Image (cartoon, grey):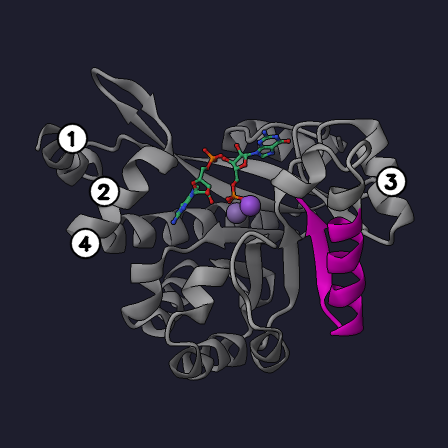
């Protein structure tokens, strides 16, 4: 397959880029973190979304080396900002299922050592399906990661099949409300109820909560009234290259 062979060479040809989308504390208005989002600049096909190539990378096993590159690049960038004296903020990195199973704790430990990045500022985003597959086996890995000082969040929360019993047992710091509930939160009573339940549940379980996909002030105001303090979305900023992210960090949103 053509795409597969070019994906195989993409790392050595330096065709990947990380964009950074700010996460904002809506009480203080300050940037408190970034989510690293991967882009592939294909020489002929242009920019390809991870939605298209992550599944292929998973099937072929290439996700392991790509995932390492993502972790290393994100940690290195965040460390550069901290060393430049910028206010430390969280760096959130998305993980895929296959990465999760392959000695992830050793890989993360090696990258933290190599980059010198303080794990307190590293957050790993997992999906419900990653967590719930072999849920009981996962606990040990999750505990190893948190023992190292990293924090763990559930991405796209509400779209999968989390068991509430596991939510309680896993050492999770944060739920990220999927943007499908945020989109119509001001007009659709069901979405509003779901968003509110997720916020309340997170707080009850002593977790933080971030709303994703906030595009309008009305969504921000409503979610803030429901007690959600951290948000991410085009209303604040699109995912941007490192230099622009640094400006957002220096000057604010
Ligand atoms: O950034 P964008 O909306 O195009 O992301 C599309 C999807 O790709 C999202 O589900 C996002 O979580 C995922 N994604 C983005 N970057 C990465 C990455 O570095 N690793 C993995 N596994 N998924 C990513
Ligand atoms: O699955 P995950 O939450 O990691 O996906 C992140 C993706 O969501 C990123 O690719 C990013 O481009 C996209 N995204 C971020 N903010 C918004 C937003 O406000 N609206 C929409 N439609 N997409 C967003
Ligand atoms: Mn994510
Ligand atoms: Na999401």
For the residue labelled by badge 3, is the local secondary structure a helix, a strand or a loop?
helix
Callout 1 touching callout 2 (CB < 8 Å):
yes
Q: Nearer the viewer, residue 250 or 141?
A: 141
- Image spot of residue 154 (x, y percent): 56, 60
Question: What residue did someone put label 1 on?
Answer: 3
At label 3, counting other C-alpha atoms closer than 10 Å, the crowd grade (few under 14, some 14-19, many 20 or more) is some
Q: Which mark is residue 61?
A: 4
Residue at the spot x=86%, y=45% of the render?
224
Instruction: Find the distance from the CA under tag 4 to the CA under tag 3.
Output: 42 Å
Labels 4 and 1: the sequence-earlier one: 1
Question: What residue did someone put label 3 on?
Answer: 222
Instruction: Find the distance from the CA under tag 4 to the CA under tag 2.
Output: 8 Å
Question: What residue did someone put label 2 on?
Answer: 56
Instruction: Find the distance from the CA under tag 1 to the CA under tag 2.
Output: 9 Å
Examine the residues drawn in magenta and state their main secondary structure.
Answer: helix
Q: Is residue 179 above or below residue 104?
A: above
- Across the whole image, how many numbered discs are drawn on residues? 4
Callout 4 touching callout 2 (CB < 8 Å):
no
- Image spot of residue 186 (x, y percent): 82, 33
Residue at the spot x=62%, y=74% of the render?
164
Q: Nearer the viewer, residue 209 or 188?
A: 188
Labels 1 and 2: the sequence-earlier one: 1
Labels 1 and 3: the sequence-earlier one: 1
At label 1, counting other C-alpha atoms closer than 10 Å, the crowd grade (few under 14, some 14-19, many 20 or more) is few
Highlighted range, magenta: 193-212
């Amino acid at each position: 397959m053509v795409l597969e062979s070019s994906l195989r060479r993409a790392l050595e040809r330096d065709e990947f880029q990380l964009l950074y989308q700010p996460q904002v504390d809506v009480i203080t208005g300050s940037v408190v973190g970034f989510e690293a989002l991967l882009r592939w600049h294909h020489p002929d096909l242009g920019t390809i979304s991870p939605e298209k190539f992550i599944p292929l990378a998973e099937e072929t096993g290439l996700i392991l080396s790509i995932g390492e590159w993502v972790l290393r690049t994100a940690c290195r960038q965040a460390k550069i900002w901290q060393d430049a004296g910028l206010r430390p903020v969280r760096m959130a990195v998305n993980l895929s299922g296959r990465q999760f199973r392959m000695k992830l704790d050793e890989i993360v430990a090696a990258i933290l050592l190599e980059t010198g990045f303080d794990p307190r500022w590293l957050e790993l985003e997992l999906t419900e399906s990653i967590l719930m597959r072999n849920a009981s086996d996962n606990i040990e890995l999750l505990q190893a990661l948190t023992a190292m000082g990293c924090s763990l969040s559930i991405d796209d929360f509400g779209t999968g099949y989390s068991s509430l019993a596991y939510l309680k047992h896993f050492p999770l710091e944060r739920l990220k409300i999927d943007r499908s509930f945020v989109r119509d939160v001001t007009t659709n009573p069901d979405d509003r109820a779901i968003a509110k339940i997720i916020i309340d549940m997170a707080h009850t379980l002593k977790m933080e909560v971030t709303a994703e996909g906030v595009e309008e002030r009305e969504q921000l105001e409503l979610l803030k009234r429901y007690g959600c303090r951290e948000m991410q979305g085009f209303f604040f900023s699109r995912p941007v290259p490192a230099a622009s992210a640094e400006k957002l960090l220096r000057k604010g949103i």
